[in-house]
Image (cartoon, rainbow, N blue to C red):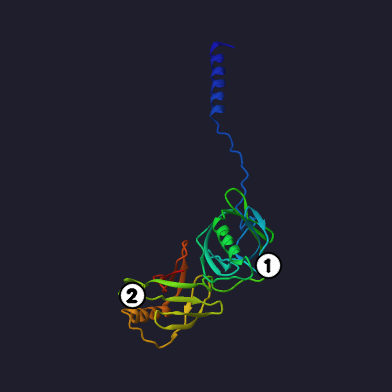
Amino acid sequence: MNDNAVILVIGALIVGILVAGCTTPSPQTVPVTPLPTTAMPVTMPEETTLTGTWTLVSILAQGRGTSMVPLTTITTTFTESGLGFGSAGCNRYVVTYQVSGDRIAVGKPAVAKNECSSPIGVSDQETIYLSNLKAAERFTIDGERLTFYDLKGTVLLIYDRSASQESSLPIAGIPWILQLYRMESGANMPANLDTEVTALFGTDGTLTGSAGCNAYNGTYTTSSGTTISISEPLVTTEKYCIAYGVMDQEEDYLALLPSVASYEVTSDGILYLMDEHSTPLIRYSI
């Protein structure tokens, strides 16, 4: 083979190699999983909720767990709106509460002020119970049993879930005392210090109290959450009081009640009655 032939052969080989090197390889097919056309089933974690009525079975007193004073019953009902209420053995009470995981923060209890001397020990038990409830920091629910603990893990209160659920108004059974009310001008007027204006929402749907001079009564209804509606007109006695401002305050106060559409209890035990726009109309304490 002459030199020209050798050059041609080598050139052909080089061209072949270059062409082969520039050839684009065929793409590989990657399997793709199609999106589901229906919602995929999701397993939700089991809820542990305080909502419902609980009956106390044991209370920490003097460093040890003790059973209830005979012939007494202590209950608490936790609502979805963040209120807890019930009987402390002698008096009814209401508190606010907040939950995050297994942590709980309980507000200052608003408590009626009845004196109970029987059975022996009921008043002391009530004081200890309300103190322990306020001190609760953590809780567990095991089946039908609810336990409250302090920060150190000490058991404070043990409840069993009640078969019957209390359906009364959380603020019922507590005599509320007027602090402020909203005047027609929009200004907030402090209660006259020479009088005591009260409101007692009964567990039977009645509303009674003193308007400062005259007693009044009526009815109320609730539907859900913190909504409330007060009957109109309210029935009052017909006395006239000469103390300055008492009758004007009474007239303004009674005129506000039928406008109430909802209520709110604060963490420091203050009750607000509000209109349909959530504007506070009346403020009470205990």
Q: Which residue is the extreme one toward the right?
A: 143
Q: Which residue is the extreme one toward the top?
A: 2
Q: Which mark is residue 70?
A: 1
Spot occupied by residue 150 in the image (x, y as percentages of width and height) = 58, 52
Q: Disc 1 on helix, strand or loop? A: loop
Q: Nearer the viewer, residue 31 or 217?
A: 217
Kindly report which numbered mark, 2 or 1, lies closer to the viewer in this rendering: 1
Residue that appears at 41% across and 76% down: 197
Quadrant in which residue 118 is drawn: bottom right
Quadrant in which residue 9 is drawn: top right
Residue 67 shows in this picture: yes
195 on left or right of 107: left
The residue type indicated by label 2 comes to Met
142 on left or right of 253: right
Q: Disc 2 on helix, strand or loop? A: loop
Question: In the rendered image, which residue does mark 2 sit on?
Answer: 183
In the displayed structure, 81 sits above or below 31; it is below
